[in-house]
Image (tube, grey):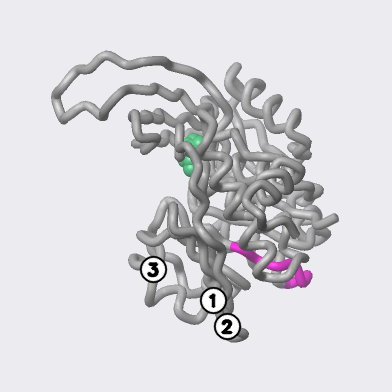
Amino acid sequence: MTSVVVVGSINLDVVTVCDRFPQPGETITGVSVSFGQGGKGANQARSAARAGARTVFVGAVGDDDAAETVLGSLTAAGVDVSPVRRVPGSTGFANVTVDGTGENHIIVVPAANAEVELDDAARAAITAADVLLLQLEIPLPVVTEAARTARASGTTVLLNPSPVQPIPDELVELLDAVIVNRDEAAALAEAIATVPQVITTLGGAGARATSPEGTVESPGFEVRVVDTTGAGDAFAGALAANWNRPPAERILRANAAGALTATAPGAAAAPSGADVDAFLAEQGLAR
Ligand code: RIB
């Protein structure tokens, strides 16, 4: 079993579903509202655990009721949250609006996520893991420190540079692979040119992994899209969990996990490894 550590954000997502997004200054009537665990880091940790990896999450929550809600949800998914810091104040929060096509708009308030730090327990977890999975919703110096700790112990370092922002050279040099969507790939083309492996998600058109050994691709899947929130996170988490498989297989499984996540509401809809097996069998792509 692959062991994965995710160092990243955890949020309470408030998800409002509406037929269409409002224009600036416009008030519209929504269809529904719900609360759920979110945050790119926590979503990716959930996906890795659901995909079958032994998974540890390192992050920070506040001292409010939301902290118990989001940590309880992640624990129930099989993620070890013991290294999570508890700080005075609010847990991270995201206002997610989803329209009738499944597209979203997201506003994140970092709150406790701005106070993630690595203590001895976090460093030990990174050192012991096969794979470290990072995003950019926590302070960059902590992301870089986690990557440096991983590199020193031979742990594979994967970065999903989302939300997209400039990446310092020091961090780029520590990466084994980046996981980007088309917009991130375009925005960071120059910055990530030296990263050994680039995995690009192509929305409905599938995914591609490029490395010095060549390019492997996964086909797009036709699914009924309900909510794309967290689909990219599910892809990244499943990819990390399947990192010990051959490249074509791990991309295929990650792509299936992302597609299945988009068929259900909320960011915390990552499928299990068995769900992915069944889906791939239906598609005639069982491995
Ligand atoms: O990637 C989706 C996530 O982005 C949401 O869960 C939200 O919390 C934001 O972090």
Task: First in sequence, mark 1 or 3: give its number.
Answer: 3
The residue shown at (49%, 18%) is 34
Q: Position of residue 264 (x, y in %)?
A: 54, 31
Q: Taking 236 as reference, is 243 above or below it?
A: below
Q: Give the numbered dot on residue 214.
A: 2
Q: Taking 239 as reference, is 151 above or below it?
A: below
Q: Secondary structure at mark 2?
A: strand
Q: Is residue 154 left or right of residue 86?
A: right
Examine the rendering and report whether any part of residue 129 can be seen: yes
Magenta span of residues: 152-158
Q: Secondary structure at mark 3?
A: loop
Q: Taking 251 as reference, is 76 above or below it?
A: above
For label 1, count other residues whose C-alpha is less than 10 Å away and answer few (under 14), some (14-19) or many (20+): some
The quadrant in which the N terminus is found is: bottom right
Q: Secondary structure at mark 1?
A: strand
Q: Nearer the viewer, residue 176 or 183?
A: 183
Quarter holding residue 75: top right
The residue shown at (50%, 42%) is 223
Q: Give the numbered dot on residue 122.
A: none
Give the mark toward the camera: 2 or 3. Answer: 2
Residue corresponding to mark 3: 188
The residue shown at (41%, 15%) is 32
Residue corresponding to mark 1: 210
Proximity of marks 1 and 2: CB atoms separated by less than 8 Å: yes
Is disc 2's CB within 8 Å of ligand 1?
Answer: no
Examine the rendering and report whether any part of residue 107 can be seen: no
The residue shown at (53%, 61%) is 219
Residue type marked 1: Thr
Q: Nearer the viewer, residue 219 or 237?
A: 219
Quote the CA–CA distance across marks 1 and 3.
15 Å
For label 2, count other residues whose C-alpha is less than 10 Å away and answer few (under 14), some (14-19) or many (20+): few
Proximity of marks 2 and 3: CB atoms separated by less than 8 Å: no
